[in-house]
Image: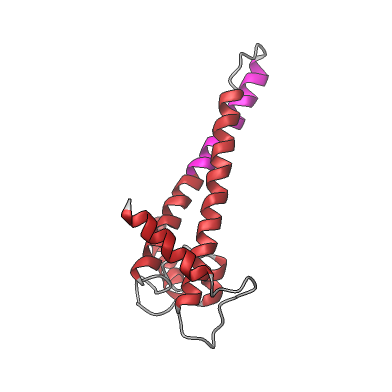
Amino acid sequence: MTDVSHVEGKQMKQEAFLPEDYRPAEDEPFMNERQAEYFRRKLLDWRAELLAGSKDTIEGLQDGTRNIPDVADRASEETDRSLELRTRDRQRKLVSKIDGALRRIDEGEFGYCSVTGEPISLKRLDARPIATMSLEAQERHERREKVHRDD
């Protein structure tokens, strides 16, 4: 219980110095408090959006359980439900990655490549705040993956 109030207090304190129109810039120290708070908020908003969509899906699936006599209509509805569940599973995994990124922010490791230790570009982090590798390291990783997949 203490941890939650500590975290909430920390976020409340940091909110005071982050202007609404703030965007991380290359000319400021990398992953300073403002940048860290910017990405924390971005991740928390994204997470809240995903969880709200997940709640809507669960409610829709519960409401949508009905007996459909036509075989083709039933098959179509089952396909739609299956697709929705796969989408939600991907989003569940994404929430887990968002939680990992939030943990890295708290630990001071956010924004640094897990392979090289170098800073990940702000553009990349802004586009994909769950990124754990620099663009170059990610490309090398994907090339290696492709080579091994082709075997």
Q: Residue at x 61, y 13 (%)?
A: 67
Residue drawn 46% across and 72% down? 36
Q: Is residue 151 rendered to the left or right of residue 94?
A: left
Q: Is residue 79 above or below residue 128?
A: above
From the top left corner, tell me how far across and down residue 53 is, in percent.
58, 42
In terms of depth relative to the viewer, which is nearer, 7 or 114?
7
Number of callouts: 0
Prevailing SS of the magenta stretch: helix
**Which residue does the image show at 39% across and 73% down from the upper left?**
113
The verdict on residue 80 being magenta is: yes
Residue 36 lies left or right of residue 63; in this view the side is left
Q: Quadrant of residue 4?
A: bottom left
**Magenta-tinted stretch:** 71-89
Observer-nearest residue: 72 or 41? 41
Rendered view: 38 above or below 66: below
Could one spot residue 20 in this view of the protein?
yes
Relative to the observer, which residue lies in front, 24 or 124? 24
